[in-house]
Image (cartoon, grey):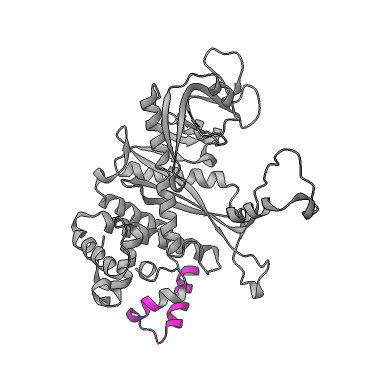
Amino acid sequence: MGVIVKGSTRLKALAQFISPRRAAHSVKAVAVALGYFLTKAHFPARQVSSRVLLAAAREVDPAQMERYRGKVILVIDPTEYPKRSRGKGKRGRQMQHVGRVRKKKEKKKRQSNSKRKEPGKSGAKAAPGKRKESTATTTGYVDVWAGMVLKGKQFLPLARRLYSSYHPQQRSQNRVEKAVLFRALGMVKRLGLTAIVVGDRGLGRKELVIRLAKRGRDFVFRIDGDINARLEGAEGEGLLSELLAQQPWLGEAEWDQGEEGKLHCRVRKVRASIRFSRSGRQDDYEEARLHFVELVPVEEGKESLILVTTLPVDNIVDARGIARVYALRWSVETGFETMKAWGLGRFMVRKWEAIDRLLWIVAVAYAVMVVAHRHVRLGRLREQAVALIKQASVFGRKLTIGKLAEALTLDYADHRRAWANARLL
């Protein structure tokens, strides 16, 4: 509740919320106690948080879950928290195990301004052709999340795990992603549901794709076209992009790019096999036969979208369905946007255990708000939130998780005792 009402993960802000219900002489003393709890207390944060998230999922009406062919949608995506690194801090107080993450891209305005400079005046020679831009990196952490998609492109978290390339016990981000994915799939199974896994290009790796296909898991992943694939009956392999280019057009479809809008595309598909070998030996490999769907934008200069799936793709209707399932991936981005507004990436704790526990607290807080936003018995709460937001600010088209949290923040100052005793789950 402190994270929701204060919209922050700073210990001082949380202590201001908690101090009236603690036998403490000052807010600072409560902040110190919170720091001790996050860093040293013997508390199974991951296990308890996972149970709360599972309980939150059980409170959601199954009719409100997004589905395709009767199966719920499980989306997985990593997010990054850039952090300043000072190397070795004073008295060992630097953030623990800070790794490398991608640096945010510069704004388009800066890029356009740099293009306006004349080559003669800048003194730099223009390079022939286009240069491939290297991905800039900075210091920070990676956090992998997985959860179900609810109607309205809303995200309900089920599993997450913190990753850093500098952590002594973590070998690769790929392993962390697989651990989060299969944990989330296990929780979906406990709910008595079957899921279709959806992920972006980073998840579309041969090893993971083939492993899921071998286990009978349905998925829709974005994949690069520069991998080798083989048509049935063909002697050798060829690039997937070349195999797709040889296929006839099925029809047209819309590619939903989230905030960037929709692209009108032409669609083609192919069924082919891909192989993966960990040892590199010719006879040591795993193979899966999958469907590949390509959406080629009609507008020139736009990159095409290639999706790999185990779901049937027999006609343009099926292809549009696959494109729609992939578009549901944007639900996790909207979830990140709301949680980062609460301080998901602005934490100030330094120890690895404390960071991980604080992120679990944010996940639970967000799940509680999703239940409050969806639960049938909390209709009166939503009505009061809408009325309050309309009085205090611009409401917008509909009540979102962020708006509901804003209403709680405004109302808490006048009704502290009622909110302290409220039980949303």
Question: Residue 31 location, x and y as percent?
Answer: 45, 77
Question: Residue 108 location, x and y as percent?
Answer: 58, 53
Q: Is residue 207 left or right of residue 124?
A: left
Quadrant hosting residue 15: bottom left
Q: Residue at x 27, y 76 (%)?
A: 416
Q: Is residue 192 left or right of residue 320?
A: left
Question: Residue 52 location, x and y as percent?
Answer: 33, 57
Determine whether 56 is above or below 273 in the image.
Answer: below
Q: Residue at x 68, y 68 (%)?
A: 88
Q: Would residue 104 be seen by someone viewing this image from the given angle?
A: no
- Is residue 28 shown in magenta? yes
Q: Residue at x 39, y 71 (%)?
A: 6
Q: Is residue 379 left or right of residue 74?
A: left
Q: In the depicted view, which residue is nearer to us: 334 or 57?
A: 334
- Magenta stretch, residue numbers: 16-39
Q: How many marks?
A: 0
Q: Is residue 79 left or right of residue 66?
A: right
Determine whether 323 is above or below 231 in the image.
Answer: below
Q: In the depicted view, which residue is nearer to us: 363 or 322?
A: 322
